[in-house]
Image: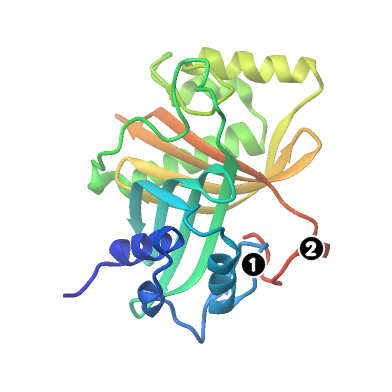
Amino acid sequence: MKFTNKQKAIALLKSIETGSLESFAYVDANNYTQHNLAFADGLIGIHTLLQQLPAGSAKVDIVRVFQDDDFIFVHSEYNFFGPKTGFNIFRFENDQIVEHWDNLQQRPASPSPSGHTMTDGFTEIRDLDKTSENKQLIKSFVEEVFVRGRMDQLENYFAGDNFIQHNPHIPDGVTGLRNTFEKLAVQGIFMRYNTIHKVLGEGNFVLVVSEGYFGVDYDSFYDLFRVENDKIVEHWDVIEPITSRLIWNNDNGKF
């Protein structure tokens, strides 16, 4: 039986939970680049990870899986040295995984102000014929609002307050988003993206990978958007501080 690249990515992630080594066959052992800065390059980094986890402690619940050409991107919840929410990106060549990126955030004990978790919500992939169009829409939104700081353009990308927000600190609606940023600004806390590294999509879902500042921290931002009728209707994110180069365990960089 031939497995799809989505199935291979899922199997590799589930090996964190099961400890199974069978999925390692999906990794190109001679050409595997690791961008999780806490682990060594190549298969040895994955082996080390499995050995470090306390027996029976790990759990991986995969919520969404998408494909954009040679990239598979996955939205999951973990018990992984504590409860976390994360995104994983795998790049394939010749049906094998050759590169991996991820972003992890501690999962909060309480839901968002509007009662959402970091992973619940819509899961069905639709509008495959609009993938490129949706990717361009979301790229324009992130560039205009978060890179150039044009908050005056915010409402152009939404259908009124019809917007579901899964960030654990922000209420639903464009009003909730704007009010949150205004409150943070009063406290001297600003969010500004410097660089967009990837825009990946499948149908009505688009993931943007960026870096920039949130307050004094320099962070990696993974933002997943759902688009409906050319407007943003739902958003999930994971924010992770980028660690000092002095403690990196590989030289590949976060992006």
Tell which residue pokes out farthest to the bottom in this image. 30
* Image quarter (top left, top right, bottom left or bottom right) of the C terminus: bottom right
- Whichever of labels 2 and 1 marks the residue nearer the N terminus, that label is 1
Q: Element at badge 2?
A: helix
Q: Is residue 128 left or right of residue 93?
A: left
250 or 195: nearer the viewer: 250
With respect to residue 180, does 89 lie above or below?
A: below
Estimate how packed mark 1 is, as few (under 14), some (14 to 19) or many (20 or more) residues with alpha carbons within 10 Å.
Answer: some
Question: Residue 157 sits in which quadrant?
Answer: top left
- Identify the residue under disc 2: 247
Residue extending furthest toward the front: 55
- Quadrant of residue 147 in the image? top right
- In the image, what residue occupies the spot 54% across and 71% down? 46
Q: Secondary structure at mark 1?
A: loop
Q: Is residue 47 above or below residue 149?
A: below
Q: Disc 1 marks which residue?
A: 39
Q: Position of residue 77 (x, y in %)?
A: 45, 43
Q: Amino acid at mark 1?
A: Phe
Residue 167 appears left or right of 77: right
Residue 220, given in percent of the width and then of the height, sits at: 64, 48
Indicate the position of residue 171 as horizontal and vertical percent values.
52, 16
